[in-house]
Amino acid sequence: MGKGEAACLAICTHRGGVLASDDRGRAFVRLVEKYIGNDRLVDTMTVVDRAVAQGAMSQKEADEVRDTVLS
């Protein structure tokens, strides 16, 4: 876990909210489970899918992001 993930986890622990991270390292996931719960951890594609569902992003834009993330 990097400094950015650690800072975001600390903020979510104290202020609430959702933590967006593509880090799925074992240590990071264990800390997320301990402090905020897995239901408050999302990855890039979850954010993109929610944006499409809410009309904030087109499916074409989402596909472009998906292609970039998966390459």
Image (cartoon, rainbow, N blue to C red):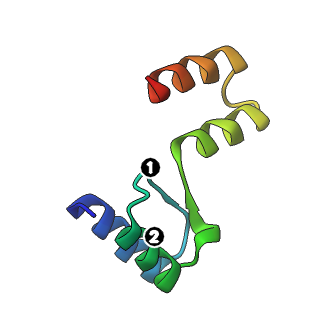
Position above or below: 33 against 68: below
Quadrant containing the C terminus is top left
Reading the image, the residue beneath label 2 is 29
Quadrant containing the N terminus is bottom left
Reading the image, the residue beneath label 1 is 22
Give how far apart the Cα atoms at labels 2 and 1 are: 11 Å
Position above or below: 29 against 20: below
The percent position of residue 10, horizontal first and vertical second, equals: 35, 76
Are there few (<14), some (14-19), or many (20+) residues within 10 Å of tag 2? some
Residue at 49% over, 28% down:
70
User: Does dot 2 land on a helix, a strand or a loop?
Assistant: helix
User: Does dot 1 land on a helix, a strand or a loop?
Assistant: loop
Left or right, 3 with respect to 67, comes to: left
Upstream in sequence: badge 2 or badge 1: 1
Position above or below: 36 against 3: below
The percent position of residue 22, horizontal first and vertical second, equals: 44, 49
Position above or below: 57 against 48: above
Amino acid type shown at disc 2: Val
Residue 28, quarter of picture: bottom left
